[in-house]
Amino acid sequence: MTRSENIHDVVVIGGGHAGTEAALAAARMGASTLLLTQNIETLGQMSCNPAVGGIGKSHLVREIDALGGAMGLAADAAGIQFRTLNASKGPAVRATRAQADRVLYRGAIRGMLERAPNLAIFQQSVVDIEIEDGRAVGVHTDMGLFFPARSVVLTTGTFLGGRIHVGLENKPGGRAGDAPSNALAERLRAMPFPVDRLKTGTPPRIAGDTVDFERLEVQHGDEPRPVMSFLSNADDHPRQLPCHVAATNENTHRIIRTGLDRSPMYTGVIEGVGPRYCPSIEDKVVRFADRTEHRIFVEPEGLDTNELYPNGISTSLPFDVQVALVRSIEGFERAHITRPGYAIEYDFFDPRGLHHSLETRTVAHLFFAGQINGTTGYEEAAAQGLLAGINASRQVAGQEPWVPGRHEAYIGVLVDDLVNLGTNEPYRMFTSRAEYRLRLRQDNADLRLTPVGRDMGLVDDRRWRTFEARRESIRAATAFLETQRVAPGSDTAAALATRCGESVSKESTLLEFLKRPRVRACDIAAVVPGLGAFPADAIEQVEIQAKYDGYIRRQDEEIAKAKAREEVTLPADLDYDGISGLSNELKGKLAAARPATLERAARIPGVTPAALSLLRIVARRHVESTRTEVLERSA
Amino acid sequence: MTRSGSGDTIAAVATAPGRGGVGIVRISGPASADIAQQVVGKKLTPRQAEFVDFRNAGDETLDRGLALYFEGPHSFTGEDILELQGHGGPGVLDLVLSRVLELGARRANPGEFSERAFVNGRIDLVQAEAILDLVNSATRQAALGAVRSLSGAFSEQVHALDRQVLALRVYCEAAIDFADEEIDFLAESDIGDRLEAIRDGLAALRSDAAQGALLNDGASVVFVGAPNVGKSSIFNRLSGDERAIVTAIPGTTRDTLTADFDLDGLPVRVIDTAGLRDTEDPVEAEGVDRTRRAMAQADIVVEVVEDLCADDAAPERTDSTLLVRNKTDLSGCEPGRVDAGIVRVCALTGDGFEDLVAELKRLAGFRSGEGAFTARQRHLDALDAAGKALDAAVSRLDEGEGELLAEELRTAHEHLGTIVGETSTDDLLGEIFASFCIGK
């Protein structure tokens, strides 16, 4: 065994979206960091569809960006089409989606990794994690190298025990063309982490010069073109391309039905559970048999390739069926498949075995992030990677973990859902998962997180200066509207009534007036001189805050209560069976979840206020009996 | 002086109404003194019981009784406490409690007084645990009981509303989270109609629940009266024919006779007794003793007398007694309700029995167990809160503010969920995926 000469603060295993954010975050915070990857060429690889963002997902990207992360910047550097989703709905649910050139995306991520101080990259496959006294102390690679570490972040995605299915054929694989990490999977299976199988899939890829685009609906990006990162400009984007929309038809569905007897899903070859929201085309055809068509978004893979990603026909049917079904689609009659679609089954660890910091409960100084925790999606993986990198680094520095609350960030919702409730399908973020959705917006991710990111050493001077200027503009614009008053009968009132259709019935500040549903800040700016001098994004922010003010204040009380409950910790070894006031059903649920605090217990479905009172008392008793014990021992 | 940092003031009915004859509304928290001032119209001296009127906002007397004020930390909870001890009738208690809530107190959660007592060091852990254990199982049963006793119809209707709100949420949330799938709920005109239908359903349910939703753990009704006035005939007719007898426990003629039956969905235990009169006969004396005990425990005492077509014989009515004047066939007077708590009947023909049953139901409706009573109040509060959110949802829909419409629907759904059980986000997503073909 060759021992690496120096010990790293943080060793990250895996170079996907979780691993790269973890390594970058740890390095930004000053930890000496080593990123181990099986293949340097695939750092930042988008294994599935070539797109970043989407509803709920761009919210995560914005939060990662607000904390100095890479994903937003890389998406802007690689984005070849940008759209604003839910543009006609309220700002809380507005989102951004970018089609990305895979090569440019990988290049952007690799560039950031290579430029990062404190960060070393090494190409080696990890086969084992060294554990001493219940604590991770380093990793072994397949060449027999040993890298000592103060903490280890594991982000191996779908590579653990990965198995690829096409029809009834299957073989081990981490992603098409890449080997799985079977030695490591075997070692981890021997450790006390509850492990289970999930599956996901991809569609066949198609050569663009064999598609008749004239017969497809064209879909251009949105103007004005949105950006992902708070630091980016639309001018930074590369050349833009359109997407296209195709659709399956009844003939396609008939072809799929005839192939079901050779489908690994429908013949029981695949045991893993797939996501309910991203079904394969065979799932859609079976479950929604009355539908006569399903839409397919035809996405370009990049600027310098004509390969296409037909989003919507993920399949693990045998190759001959894939060819037939693709060619049954209008515009695809002569289509050539460049890579077959496939399903992949992989190991994941029950995330209930993690602390909210993403450190495992059973092995100290070992963090899990990304798809191995049962999630799906680049954004979900990156968010966890960032959090794991932050907390691994904080642990080495002797600091408490940082865990954002559910009311502070989608990252907080993501981690809390996983750790508290576990998952039985690949977990994807949706805005409906966030009960404080109205405050967790992509437009205010920086206001929510950049200051705390700065405190933790994640935010560099350039980002901080940009942020401070924006925050000051918002403050000044708010102050302006707070001090300007409008009185009934005044010229201003008349002008506002004409523009907004809202009359001024009593004297109020312009900020109060802005809270009315039909009043827009730009209307006020047109009537009242001075407001237009503030930057557009600051005015927009003031308007959004004004519109949501009532709702957000209503939630404050709820949040305060949750916070008080969060401060009551429940002992890890609490004997729920011994609490006679609880129903058997609740005893079982609580014993399985082992909530660390009263608030986490409160969010377990079925927990009543009375049960919470009881738990509060029990927690108190535990504290007092521990204190007595300590006193007795010291006496 | 308030020691607890909890800040808010809580209130609840602290007695089992109908059983003791005295009903207590207990208030704990910093606003207690202020509430006392508003309700009894003067400053109370700590630890001194004062006989006062309890008044509403319009200065009308709701009830009169004893008011007691304890200053924290020398009180049960360690906080300032006000106790209003009035007549036990839940109707009255409800009015007094409503008045207190209107003055800024919040309805206490089950066990919350004990929890505060514990937090402020007034009771020890063992006591607190014992109380909370009881409260816990009692509230579980009460919650179950309340749903049961608010009759199948009530919980079915809440369930139906809950499902309708869920269906709307499925649409709204799908439209937000899956904008690519081209579900434009705001363009669908029938969202407004469905919202309107839910609001109508809720309003109807709310008024039903407030007026007549009867709940109980089985009100007990004792029949007393001199021999031969027809107690047994009335008892037999009530418990016989169309009303199902669940159990019948015959004793001797000088013992009590009990029958459990369902009075139009309201479970009632009726006890027929021996007559009340002084007697030397030891066996009959034992029967009279039993009668007295049964009366002391009863929710409703039905006194049966022979009808004399006169009203002067009526003793002072309370809301727990019913005077039945039997044998209108002999007196020749018109059978039926005479006044609140007084009915004329003919046990032989059944004339007047409709009114008798109505009077029993009226009285029994107010005589319910504390747990179920409290739980029902919670349910009504929840319906009100859900209604408020749905009203707001309508304006949000009108303004085209989809995410705020979704927020109001979520709030309404959460309130209904406190009655019929919450729907988790995961369940909601499950509904979305089952309803629509979503995903690329």
Image: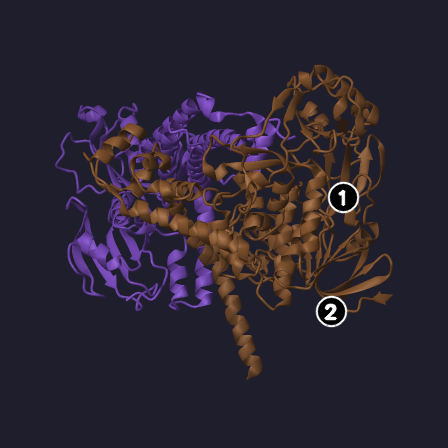
Left or right, residue B77 beside residue B421: left
Q: Which of A161 and B209 is in front in this view?
A: A161
Marked residue nearer the N-terminal end (2 or 1)? 2
Q: Identify the residue shown where x is 28% and y is 62%.
A: B80
- Decide if residue A160 is in sight here: no
Q: Tell me: residue A399, above or below residue A317.
A: below
Tag 2: residue type?
Asp
- Residue B242 point in image, percent of width and height: 40, 25
Tag 1: residue type?
Tyr
Chain coloured brown in this rendering: A
Distance from disc 2 to disc 1, alpha carbons, whole Å, reads: 29 Å
Q: Identify the residue shown where x is 56% and y is 33%.
A: A83
- Residue A129 point in image, percent of width and height: 78, 60
Q: In which quarter of the image is the C terminus of chain B?
A: top right
- Decide if residue A48 is in sight here: yes
Q: State the residue position of label 1.
A: A346
Q: Identify the residue shown where x is 43% and y is 54%.
A: A561
Q: Tell me: residue A314, above or below residue B225.
A: above
Task: Find numbered disc 1 in the image and state the secondary structure of the residue it sits on.
Answer: strand
Chain coloured purple in this rendering: B
Q: State the residue position of label 2.
A: A133
Task: Find numbered disc 2 in the image and state the secondary structure of the residue it sits on.
Answer: loop
Q: In which quarter of the image is the N terminus of chain B?
A: bottom left
Q: Tell me: residue A447, above or below residue B219.
A: below
